[in-house]
Image: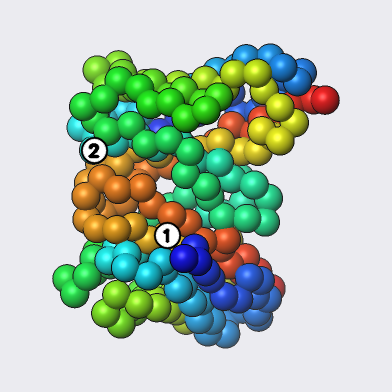
């Protein structure tokens, strides 16, 4: 069974810093790797989706990379802002049926 | 159009009662997923619907859990004889098809079983 791990569990940074969130997965046979943002009381928001054939995806200040062979993905956030504070989840999709989620990294950006 | 909606947003029930949770997917999305997130844990897959195909129920934790979907519209997740360990946020998601598309999530239903 696919297992997804995220490190660190929590992270606090001052506003303006660049930061990296890490995600690892045990089964490299994935369709894609997705990063989500979860805000309290709200649903998940999809941030980036990297297909298994891709190495990275970029959206604004966010850049996600994928290394299937080593079972790792990173989410890079440039010039962090207080509005970036949220829990970030990565998920590995191994088939059409479902995603395997990590437990998330809770990010706090301090003004 | 509108995103995925779920109702109710919060539900408090007594142990042993049945509950129904509703999900309205994005119009045109053929795939629909139910997940559960217990406090401090990651999301667990429960069930997947794709068009008119037989649903993938492999994630349902017990026979007290069931779900239905009529065509490509609303889905209902039913939990019978609720237990305290059923307390969680239940999230629904939909996507365009059965490939590697982005899943769009609803706000979830927070269920508390007393």
Q: Would you call the spot at circle 2 few (<14 residues within 10 Å), some (14-19), or many (20 or more)? A: some
Q: Residue furthest left?
A: B53
Q: How is the image coloured?
A: rainbow
Q: Secondary structure at mark 1?
A: strand
Disc 2 with disc 1 on a shared chain: no
In the rendered view, tell whether residue B31 sits above or below residue A24. below
Residue most extreme to the bottom: B17
What residue would you read off at disc 1? B93
In this orientation, does residue B34 appear?
A: no
How far across and how far down the image is residue B92, in percent? Answer: 45, 63
Q: Any mark on residue B106, and which?
A: none
Front-most of residues B104 and B75? B104
Report whether A65 appears left or right of B42. left
SS under mark 2: loop
Q: Which residue is mark 2?
A: A31
User: Which residue is depicted at the point 65% across and 79% down?
Assistant: B13
Q: Position of residue B74 (x, y in %)?
A: 40, 78
Mark 2–mark 1 contact, CB under 8 Å? Answer: no
Based on the displayed image, in which of its 4 quarters is residue B58 positioned?
A: bottom left
A24 relative to B97, above or below: above
Q: Is residue B93 above or below residue A75?
A: below
Picture quadrant of residue B10: bottom right
- Mark 1: give few (<14), some (14-19) or many (20+) Cα within 10 Å: many
Horizontal side of B65 relative to B88 (left or right) equals left
Say which residue appears at 80% left-offset and 25% top-offset: A110
Q: What residue is drawn where x is 75% and y is 31%?
A: A82
Mark 2–mark 1 Cα distance, whole angstroms, equals 18 Å
Q: Chain of mark 1?
A: B
Q: Can residue A4 be seen here?
A: yes
Q: Chain of mark 2?
A: A
Q: Residue at x 65, y 80 (%)?
A: B14
């Amino acid at each position: 069974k696919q297992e997804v791990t995220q490190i660190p569990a929590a992270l606090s940074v001052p506003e303006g810093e660049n930061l990296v969130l890490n995600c690892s997965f045990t089964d490299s046979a994935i369709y894609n790797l997705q990063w989500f943002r979860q805000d309290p009381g709200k649903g998940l928001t999809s941030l980036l989706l990297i297909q298994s054939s891709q190495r990275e995806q970029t959206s604004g200040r966010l850049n996600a990379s994928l290394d299937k062979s080593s079972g790792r993905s990173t989410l890079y956030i440039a010039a962090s802002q207080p509005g970036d504070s949220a829990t970030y989840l990565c998920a590995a999709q191994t088939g059409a049926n479902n995603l395997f989620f990590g437990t998330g990294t809770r990010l706090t950006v301090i003004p | 159009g509108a995103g995925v909606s779920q109702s109710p947003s919060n539900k408090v029930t007594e142990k042993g009662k049945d509950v129904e949770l509703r999900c309205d997917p994005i119009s045109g999305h053929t795939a629909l997923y139910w997940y559960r997130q217990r406090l401090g844990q990651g999301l667990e897959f429960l069930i997947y619907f794709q068009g008119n195909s037989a649903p993938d129920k492999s994630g349902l934790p017990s026979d007290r859990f069931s779900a239905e979907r009529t065509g490509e519209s609303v889905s209902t997740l039913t939990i019978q004889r609720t237990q305290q360990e059923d307390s969680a946020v239940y999230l629904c998601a939909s996507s365009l098809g059965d490939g590697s598309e982005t899943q769009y999530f609803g706000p979830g239903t927070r269920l508390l079983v007393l």
